[in-house]
Amino acid sequence: KNLKKHFVTPKSFFNKEEKRVRAVDDISLFISKGETLGLVGESGCGKSTFGRAVLRLTEPTSGSVHYNGVDILKLNKNDMRNMRQKMQIIFQDPYASLNPRMTVLELIRAPLDAFNIGTEKEREEKVIDILELVGLDKQNLRKYPHEFSGGQRQRIVIARALILNPEFIVCDEPVSALDVSIQSQVLNLMQQLKQELNLTFLFISHNLSVVKHISDRVAVMYLGKIVEIAEKKSLYIDPLHPYTKALMSSIPIPDIDAPERKIILTGEVPSPLNPPTGCRFHTRCSHCMEKCKVQEPALVNVSDKTMVACHLYE
Ligand code: SF4
Ligand code: MG
């Protein structure tokens, strides 16, 4: 609720003025238990920062994060540590996120070690169970990350995220580093795990096709703000915000359900250091009106399940 994460670069010899990057700038949204909320937007729009702020992996500047009714930003260190068992994150790069000197057993077992859960034997059994769940054989226990393909490594990363029986997982571009042919295998696995283990996902990606594959609802982010949230089907068939329309028109796959795709997004994404006044999209919007340059549109309901932040819909 009203979540903000601003980064301040301090003054220095080269930097006469303090600069404030509004990476996440007043975001309110909910995720229901058992759902996958997709979060899309161009790179640098603040998606990853939002995902990390929700888990307190980066401390939000202001706002609140309510998890099953508890404002986790108010928890002390110890209570937050316990809460972390319920909330996990899967990163994009399975090469960078696995320590090359640890075996598969050590890597996946590490969270159990950290929380001191079970005996050594029980931990190993649990690792074997989880490995099986992600489609890897127990023959792999003593192997090192470099002995696996990218897709297999991402399965190891997923196994490690699951070992503490979490409820909620932030998936930050989990398939973006993988070959396209492997992406759908890993997405299908995640979908299947979600069902079996009754998980809830915040699924972050710049790739609209990937988000379409896995999400129930989708939120579109632009320069630190949510500009539209809707059920997947309505967002992909009938996007409302001019930015969402432009993003949709850039999906290369022909889709007979979708309306004509003629809008092309021009211009660079403005810097979050100095975002445009009024509607942040106004510098790239073909519908821009005078009021758009000065007045920021609020995110409002336009129907039961769709919210949009644009003066065209007020
Ligand atoms: Fe375009 Fe104005 Fe809507 Fe912003 S508020 S998206 S500038 S029409
Ligand atoms: Mg990112």
Image (cartoon, helix red, strand yellow):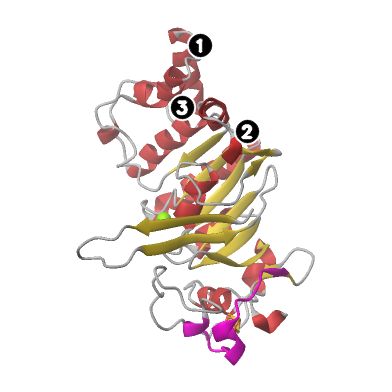
Residue at 46% x, 36% y is 158
Return the disc, 1 or 3, that comes first in the chain's sequence: 1
Q: Which mark is residue 118?
A: 1
Neighbourhood count class around disc 2 (C-alpha, 10 Å): few under 14, some 14–19, many 20 upward = few
Q: Is residue 252 visible?
A: yes
Q: Residue furthest right?
A: 304
Q: Residue furthest left?
A: 13
Q: Is residue 240 above or below residue 81?
A: below
- Image quadrant holding the C terminus, namely bottom right
Q: Under tag 2, what secondary structure?
A: helix
Q: Which residue is mark 2?
A: 197
Q: Quadrant of ligand 1?
A: bottom right
Q: Is residue 183 above or below residue 107?
A: below
The one nearer the camera, 309 or 98, is 309
Q: Which residues are magenta?
A: 282-300
Front disc: 1 or 3: 1
The one nearer the camera, 230 or 50, is 50
Q: Under tag 1, what secondary structure?
A: loop
Percent coordinates x, y for residue 33 in the rendering: 69, 42
Neighbourhood count class around disc 3 (C-alpha, 10 Å): few under 14, some 14–19, many 20 upward = many
Q: Which residue is mark 3?
A: 131
Percent coordinates x, y for residue 162 in the rendering: 52, 31
Residue type at numbered disc 1: Gly
What is the CA distance from the residue labelled 1 to the residue labelled 3?
Answer: 17 Å
Q: Under tag 3, what secondary structure?
A: helix
Residue 132 falls left or right of residue 201 = left
Q: Is residue 222 above or below residue 142?
A: below
Residue type at numbered disc 3: Leu
Residue 292 painted magenta: yes
Residue type at numbered disc 2: Leu
What is the CA distance from the residue labelled 3 to the residue labelled 2?
Answer: 14 Å
Residue at 56% x, 88% y is 288
